[in-house]
Image (cartoon, rainbow, N blue to C red):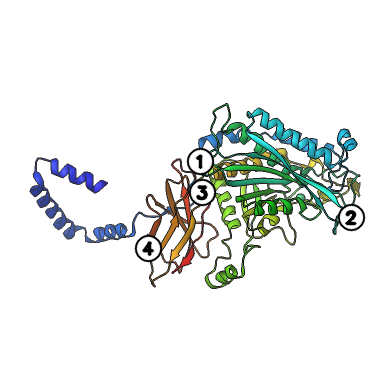
Amino acid sequence: MANQENSEIAESSSFGYLSTSLAAAVLVALALAFCAPLCLAQEMSQERGPAPRLASDSHTDSHIAEALQQVSADHIRQTIEKLVSFQNRSTISAQDKESIKAGKGIGAAREWIKAEFERYAKECGGCLEVKTDTFTEQPGDRISKPTEITNVYAVLRGTDPQQANRIVLVTGHYDSRNSDTFNGTDPAPGANDDGSGTAVSLECARVLSKAFPGKTSSGKAGFPATIVFLTVAGEEQGLDGSKHFAQMAKQQGWKLEAVLNNDIVGGNLSPGQDASVVRVFSEGLPAAASEAEIKRVRMLGGESDSSSRELARYIADVGRSYHAGVKPLLIFRLDRFLRGGDHYAFNQQGFAAVRFTEFREDFNHQHQNVRTENGIEYGDLPKFVDFDYVAHVARLNAAALASLAWAPAPPASVKMLINNLENDTTLTWEPSAGAAAYEVVWRSTTAADWEYAQTISSGTRATLKVSKDNEIFAVRAVDAAGHRSLPVVPEPEK
Ligand SMILES: [Zn+2]
């Protein structure tokens, strides 16, 4: 474009074409004589294409930033206190009509969560579909008799017919426990574990549905892709609710691109807590990797490039772009040492899923009977929860969900061409719905996060003067407003 404009200006000038050429020749001669090193550098940079920029540059959508302000620590406190009021939310606690009426047990908690989602749905002009996923869990290590388990969720349907089948999901478990896994009656407040995560899912539903209800009478904007706000039960019994839900998603062929699991995000108020960060755990080698995929990792590396890890890096990017009040601290490990959580049930079905957890857990305040012993208070009570911190984590989640649901689809069939031995790197991919451009991102093999980015403004192929031997690459799609998709690491192709 620039060259064309220059030639047009030259042709229309009064000097005419010949005099322009002469002037150009003189300029070239002068340049060669006086600035050979500079010109050589310019020539090289032209050959290399546009200079890469840092991949860590932030992109902030003012609509998302504005919506985040609606996240309320006070509302989150009300949610957590309400959940605690059900006394014991163990999966094996009461769920008969009488107990529900009395406001005791997991059945009452389930009905309240459902009513709460329905209230948000009403407030956004019916933009949320409220659903339940009920099944019977058979007896196992932590369940003595067949037990009905219900996951409760709300769906904010995407508004772009081409992208509405893309789904991003936030979850927390609403079941709780005390010192005894088989105790369904004594207090098991579960304010932090996992009233906090349940409150994050509910708060994201409330705020995002209100700000971006989509196709309703309000005419307000909606996300192109779909967001699911989930609350599960059976976590403490062995991730039962999530296993069932993830299997359902797999069987029904959901295009589930990201799962954000919030479990123990209460910012427990005890010495040593760091309220400025929230840990984000992600698996390295995928639980669902095939033997062929593991073989490729052995050959080519990629131990730190599971789709869950790319999701974690995406959340780091969101953390740089929005002022959530808390920064994601990426932990390159499936979960805390030898412990598990609901995201793993999704990983097992091949979905990208990460876990958010406060920086420092206090084990006196989780999975404990409420009591005082030797002056130490035990029990997962609301008074140990930092509601501002939970609100910060909810903001980070909401920003990630909104960014993902507004971004184009991640590029499909991303390939690295390896026909010839060469130092350049050529990548190809298929067009993404909603994309206005693409970015190739890369980092050195020893770097934790993407270091450089280069915009590819047209086409679905890029050749970079960067060696595939020394760097790790990925491609992400970008829409006209700058929303970025999850990056996709290429597969080698001959
Ligand atoms: Zn938990």
Q: Position of residue 313 (x, y in %)?
A: 56, 53
Relative to 5, 206 lies left or right:
right
Q: Position of residue 10 (x, y in %)?
A: 15, 44
- Residue 465 bears which disc, if any? 4
Q: Earlier in the sequence, mark 2 or mark 4?
A: 2
Label 3 sits on residue: 409
- Residue 48 bears which disc, if any? none
Can the viewer see residue 325?
no
Q: CA distance from mark 2 to mark 4?
A: 62 Å
Number of residues whose C-alpha sits closer than 10 Å to that of mark 2, classed few (under 14), some (14–19) or many (20 or more):
few
Can the viewer see residue 335?
yes
Specify the amino acid type for callout 2. Answer: Ser
Label 1 sits on residue: 60
Relative to 33, 55 lies left or right:
right
Q: Earlier in the sequence, mark 3 or mark 4?
A: 3
- Residue labelled 1 has its Cβ within 8 Å of some atom of ligand 1: no
